[in-house]
């Protein structure tokens, strides 16, 4: 359904995840480090929010439940986050 970016014959030659990995391993280290720091801060903020509403032990339960119930949405969001991160690194590299 959302395999637009997974087609090996598309003009991007790979998935958002593979493009992200290419950038992470080949772009300017400082730019990649800044982007990874940004992602970790967002992840930490989300973990704190989940911890406040569901407790320390409830975080994994909530994530597993969401992953099961909303797998397609999560997959699409992950692709969007990969693309956003690639865009952030590439625009700072110019």
Image (cartoon, rainbow, N blue to C red):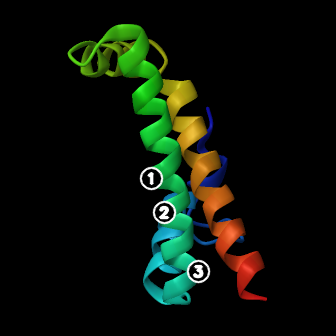
Disc 2, disc 1: CB below 8 Å? Answer: yes
Residue at the image position 59 percent from the left and 44 percent from the top: 3
Question: Between residues 26 and 7, which one lies in front from this camera angle?
Answer: 26
Residue at left offset 72%, top offset 71%? 11
The x, y position of residue 54, in whole percent, is: 35, 9
Residue linked to disc 1: 40
Identify the residue at horizontal 48%, vertical 64% (top origin): 36
Q: Which residue is mark 3?
A: 31
Identify the image quadrant of residue 38.
bottom right
Q: Considering the image in quadrants, where does the N terminus appear?
A: top right
Q: Is residue 87 above or below residue 29?
A: above
Q: What x and y, as percent, mark residue 15?
A: 55, 60
Q: Which residue is mark 2?
A: 37
Residue extending farthest to the left is 57
Element assignment for label 2? helix
Q: Is disc 1 surrounded by few (<14), some (14 to 19) or many (20+) residues within 10 Å?
A: few
- Residue 52, percent across and down? 41, 15
10 Å crowding of disc 2: few (<14), some (14-19), many (20+):
few
Under circle 1, the secondary element is: helix
Tell me, for residue 65, which label it has, or none.
none
Q: Position of residue 20 (x, y in %)?
A: 53, 68
Q: Secondary structure at mark 3?
A: helix
Contact, CB < 8 Å: mark 2 with mark 3? no
Disc 2 to disc 3, C-alpha distance? 10 Å
As measured in the structure, the alpha-carbon distance from the residue carrying label 2 to the one carrying label 1 is 5 Å
């Amino acid at each position: 359904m959302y395999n637009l970016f997974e087609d090996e014959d598309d003009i991007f030659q790979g998935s958002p995840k593979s493009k992200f990995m290419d950038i992470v391993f080949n772009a300017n280290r400082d730019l990649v480090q800044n982007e990874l720091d940004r992602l970790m801060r967002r992840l930490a903020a989300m973990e704190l929010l989940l911890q406040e509403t569901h407790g320390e032990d409830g975080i994994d339960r909530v994530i597993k439940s969401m992953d099961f119930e909303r797998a397609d949405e999560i997959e699409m969001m992950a692709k969007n986050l990969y693309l956003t991160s690639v865009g952030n690194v590439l625009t700072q590299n110019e």
